[in-house]
Amino acid sequence: MFRTESYSGLGQYPGKYRSIAAKSWVRLAAIALVVFGIGYWGFSSVRTSSGLPGVGSGSKAKAVDSRLQSVHCDVPHPGRPLVQYVLMIDAGSTGSRIHVYKFNYCKDHPELEDEIFEQVKGGLSSFGDNADGAAHSLDGLMDVAMKGVPEQLRSCTPIAVKATAGLRMLGTEKSERILEAIRAHLANDYPFKLIPNNPVEIMDGKDEGIYAWITVNFLLGTLGKEEHSTAATFDLGGGSTQIVFEPRYEKWNAETGGPQLALGEHRYEMSYGGQEYVLYQHSYLGYGLMEARKKIKAAIAQEASASGKFSVEHPCFPPGFREEVAAADGKSQITIKGASKDSLNGKSTTEACYEEVRKIFNKDAPCSQKPCSFNGVYQPELDKTFIDNPFYIFSYFYDRTYPLGVRDEFKLSDIKALADKVCKHDVSLFASKEQQEEVGAENHYCLDLSFQFALLKDGVGMPENRVVRSTRKIRDAETGWCLGASLAVLDQSRYCKPKSFF
């Protein structure tokens, strides 16, 4: 809304009238006609450049930057900016990724309108003592942010860097130096606004899982609904894996008033849209895909070392595979080789690999608070407390299944069938050239799929006939924890101010 001062037709403020000779009226009338003509044609040009009907289609008026506008509304909710950007950097164990989120405030709560995503390989932990190198490894991602966020909004665009399990394993001293170098680099060399609380940090595994759950259910539109038909999330990263779901005890214990979700760190309570949620969450540090590989290889090497061997052939790996691995006790170096028929002892490659993988779950660990999943961790039983609601698995679950033909919705038994196929170590079993090349290029497919199946079935107790969903995007937005963390950033503080017109 534009504001103008009120002037008289003589160019004087109201109340400041003075007499003018009659002969001056002719001159003034001519001037007025010229001014009126210029004003009319200029206004017509503005109307035309705004898409309104009018004269002056040849106007070269500068178009408004679409990044400053919303496609859903022209007027924001009172007291809110029309658009608000948030930058969230996920510093994972194998690489870093940036999400440039554009939200609108057409309503009283933020709605996701657009997302830009970019990633670079090489986790922060790979830089070790080179803290400055770790900080500058994010420059390519920051270039994406500079291009994606309009200049007018950069100073009020919050940014956060949240590292996950990979950096946590580097140790406190080294990881803190890296985090401080990143914090200084962003504050001194870029125009964005660091969030007030812990802008650069190693994220707690609990928060990682909760944010992923919020992301998925926000995108599905299940939050704030009375029926509580929320989806579960299981995020398999490189260093850790997180499960979050809303147990629904009332569906099976309404008559007996049976067990409820036990108290403890696994219990997370939150509210959204007038609804209260009591969630179960747990982060399994060391059970991300890359760390699981290390555990399984170390166990294989330890068994060989205990038998007095210096090398072992193993069915989890294809012919031609060879890797030097330290035994779990760190006392010897063992050569692990790919499978041969003589190494199977009458078992199929799938059975032999699956048997090895199951050992790392420590199912016999003491369970002080029942029921337990693995490693003595308390968890409500999925087949009793989470029967019907959707179950989303993503990150490495998606990365290992989608290239081999498994699509968005499937049963857990389909992962087992895929593992059976891959573990035969025969690429000709796959119909397409792309799938053959995919399997041939990655020596860990049999191990990875066997681990994923075992993690879901033996680890958290999912029935084989359970339907699961795996996707990288929902409504064109990346799944994972970043969107949920960005929504929390907006919930905790206000950044860009409502636009004023003068």
Image (cartoon, rainbow, N blue to C red):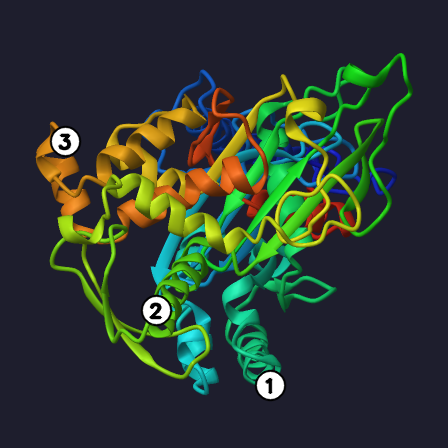
The kind of residue on which mark 2 rests is Ala
Question: Alpha-carbon distance for marks 2 and 1?
Answer: 31 Å
Rendered residue at 41%/79% (across/down): 127
What secondary structure is marked by label 2?
Answer: helix
Q: Are marks 1 and 3 in contact (CB under 8 Å)?
A: no
Q: Earlier in the sequence, mark 2 or mark 1?
A: 1
For marks 2 and 3, give the one nearer the viewer: 2
Per the image, label 3 sits on a secondary structure element best described as loop
Depth order, front residue of 354/110: 354
Residue 259 location (% of width, % of height): 86, 29
The one nearer the camera, 52 or 223, is: 223
Left or right: 128 with respect to 15?
Answer: left
- Residue tagged 1: 173
Q: Which residue is mark 2?
A: 301
Q: Disc 2 vs disc 1: Cβ atoms closer than 8 Å?
A: no
Q: Is residue 143 visible?
A: no
Q: Check disc 1: other Cα within 10 Å, few if <14, some if 14-19, many if 20+.
A: few
Foreground of the two, 398 or 422:
422
User: Residue 146's x, y, as percent?
Assistant: 44, 59
Q: Residue at x 73, y 64 (%)?
A: 196
Tag 2 near tag 3, CB within 8 Å: no
Picture coordinates of residue 477, whole percent (x, y): 48, 35
